[in-house]
């Protein structure tokens, strides 16, 4: 039963986070000649701040109920942006002295992520 409650908490948080992301995208126009993605930029920065705040509060004496952390950090932030989770994991590496691992994670995620997007795009264009 505990696992079902955890799944529901994450799902509810993800729903609200995804809806919030959608609303931000509707509120902020794509700007400039190159079409800078202001909404994605704003969501990523705000999500990183929120994840940092939740993590910081959870680490204090008395902390944060683990269920609330699931709802806010995993659920809401995960639905709002996975970029916040990615950078939160890297911050944890840096806090624990694993600077090289953080650098490898950042570089490989960016390089392979971009390559995967391009490959997926090309695969779909090749298929049609």
Image: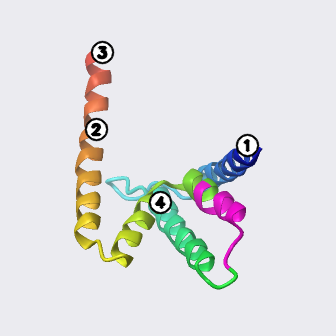
Give the spatial CA distance, label 3 vs label 1: 39 Å
Q: Mark 2 — residue?
A: 116
Q: Choose the circle earlier in sequence order: 3 or 4.
A: 4
**Mark in front: 2 vs 1:** 1
Q: Choose the circle earlier in sequence order: 1 or 4.
A: 1
**Mark in front: 3 vs 4:** 4
Write down the region rendered in magenta: 63-74
Q: Residues within 10 Å of mark 2 (few under 14, many from 20)?
A: few
- Disc assigned to residue 127: 3
Counting from the top left corner in percent of width and height, residue 19 is at: 66, 49
Q: Is residue 52 above or below residue 85?
A: below
Give the spatial CA distance, label 4 vs label 2: 19 Å
Q: Residue furthest front?
A: 1
Give the spatial CA distance, label 1 vs label 4: 22 Å
Q: Secondary structure at mark 2?
A: helix
**Mark in front: 2 vs 3:** 2
Counting from the top left corner in percent of width and height, residue 43 is at: 52, 61
Q: Residues within 10 Å of mark 3 (few under 14, many from 20)?
A: few
Question: Is residue 68 magenta-colored?
Answer: yes
Magenta-drawn stretch, dominant element (helix, strand or loop): helix
- Disc assigned to residue 4: 1
> Badges 2 and 3: C-beta atoms under 8 Å apart?
no
Q: Choose the circle earlier in sequence order: 4 or 2.
A: 4
> Badges 4 and 2: C-beta atoms under 8 Å apart?
no
Of 107 and 3, which appears nearest the observer?
Answer: 3
């Amino acid at each position: 039963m505990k696992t079902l409650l955890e799944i529901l908490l994450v799902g509810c948080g993800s729903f609200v986070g995804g809806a919030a992301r959608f609303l931000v995208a509707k509120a902020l126009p794509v700007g400039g000649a190159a079409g800078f993605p202001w909404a994605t930029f704003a969501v990523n920065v705000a999500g990183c701040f929120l994840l940092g705040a939740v993590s910081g509060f959870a680490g204090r004496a008395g902390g944060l109920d683990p269920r609330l952390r699931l709802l806010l950090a995993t659920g809401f932030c995960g639905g709002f942006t996975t970029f916040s989770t990615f950078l939160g994991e890297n911050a944890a590496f840096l806090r624990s002295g694993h600077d090289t691992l953080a650098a490898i994670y950042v570089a490989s995620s960016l390089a392979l992520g971009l390559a995967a997007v391009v490959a997926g795009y090309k695969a779909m264009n090749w298929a049609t």
